[in-house]
Image (cartoon, rainbow, N blue to C red):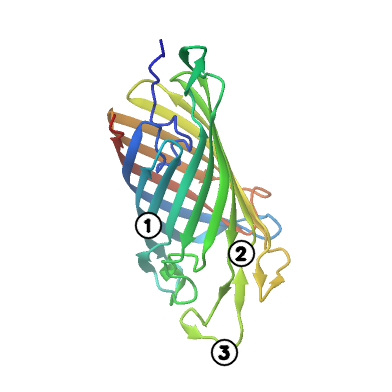
Amino acid sequence: MLESPVYTCNSCGGGTGDLAVLSLDGLALFNIGFSRDQFNGVWDKEGKWLSNNYSQSQFKIAMNSAYRLNRHIQFAVSLPFVFNNSNIPGLKQNGSGIGDLAIGGRFEIFHEFQPKKEGKKLKLDKTLPYLAITFGLTLPTGSSEENAENDVDITGKGFYSTTLGISVTKTILRNKLQILGDLSWQHSFEKKYSSYFGEPITYEYRKQAGEKFNYSLTANYIINSFHSFSLTASGFFQNNYKTNGTEIDNSNERSSALVLAYTYYPWVPFRITTSVKTGLPGDGMGMNAQGSTTFNINFTYYIPSVK
């Protein structure tokens, strides 16, 4: 007889940090997330950590949803609303607006504990991990430095970008401990500016971000049907920027962070996830990037597949 598989909310890949991902028995989900980023410093081009002298923060409200098309394909969409705040003297202190729209999907090659035939019997495959190819497109629906009047008015990147990656989940202890890994490559398309911070440009100015690689490794521990914890190490590194087709020396970026998350399941289709993400301030821990501490809470409702 085939064992009945138990799909926990985190058994679908992506972990608690990737909330718009469906397990195999899920048809759709709807999620609203609230986050606050407190920027506490930057790494310069030499990798030296410089603490902020002024307060800068960003608050986001993000709407996310996902839909499973079939056993192997699911899609997701995310749209944030961004609020920026800064107390730098002489500059505008508050700004807000819609952020960049992100559309993504997954092609799931394997699922953990999927049925397999052995002779005339159906058994669960306990060897294969969850494995998926991930892909996405980000649209510049937010305000960038092209049309924003001040730094606090910037809510998006201003250019199109695509992502391609791989997501793996392997259960170590059934319904208790999982290890999740995600790796992705992001390609940004060149942006041609007609203005800069609202001022018309009379010369040619084209800018392109370097190739970016994101990574994360998560350990997820399920206490029981109501509670789980996860710890994630994540980061990115990005190649040099280009202006007018010429690479800018020493403009590459990198940073790393740790994320501690707790998820509470009041009932089967609903979960609440809170997390704290902190950069690793200190010399050599980043380059040409901002460091911050992020507090996040997400509310997610799942619609199960109809059998």
User: Which residue type does callout 2 highlight?
Assistant: Ala
Q: Residue furthest left?
A: 267
Q: Measuring from the top left, give residue 12's x and y in whole percent.
A: 44, 33
Compare marks 1 and 3 and give the one earlier in the sequence.
1
Q: Earlier in the sequence, mark 3 or mark 2?
A: 3
What x and y, as percent, mark residue 295? 41, 45
Give, as a three-letter code, the residue at label 1. Pro
Asked if residue 84 is positioned above or below residue 269 in the image, the reply reads below
Disc ID at residue 202: 3
* SS of the residue under disc 2: loop
Residue 230 on image: x %, y %: 47, 31
Separation of marks 3 and 2 at Cα, in angstroms: 22 Å
Find the distance from the CA under tag 2 to the CA under tag 1. Answer: 22 Å
The percent coordinates of residue 60 (x first, y second) are 37, 55
Can the viewer see residue 201?
Answer: yes
Q: Which mark is residue 80?
A: 1
Residue at the location (68% across, 62% down)?
240
Vertical position of residue 199 compared to residue 143: above or below: below
Q: Quadrant of the N terminus?
A: top left
Q: SS at mark 3?
A: loop
Furthest residue toward top = 1
Is residue 73 or residue 302 the one in the foreground?
73
Which secondary structure lies at badge 1? strand
- Which residue position is annotated with label 2? 209
Q: Is residue 36 above or below residue 92?
A: above
Dot 1 alpha-carbon crowd within 10 angstroms: few under 14, some 14 to 19, many 20 or more:
many
Alpha carbons under labels 1 and 3: distance apart: 33 Å
Q: How many marks?
A: 3
- Are there few (<14), some (14-19), or many (20+) residues within 10 Å of tag 3? few
Q: Residue at x 33, y 22 (%)?
A: 225
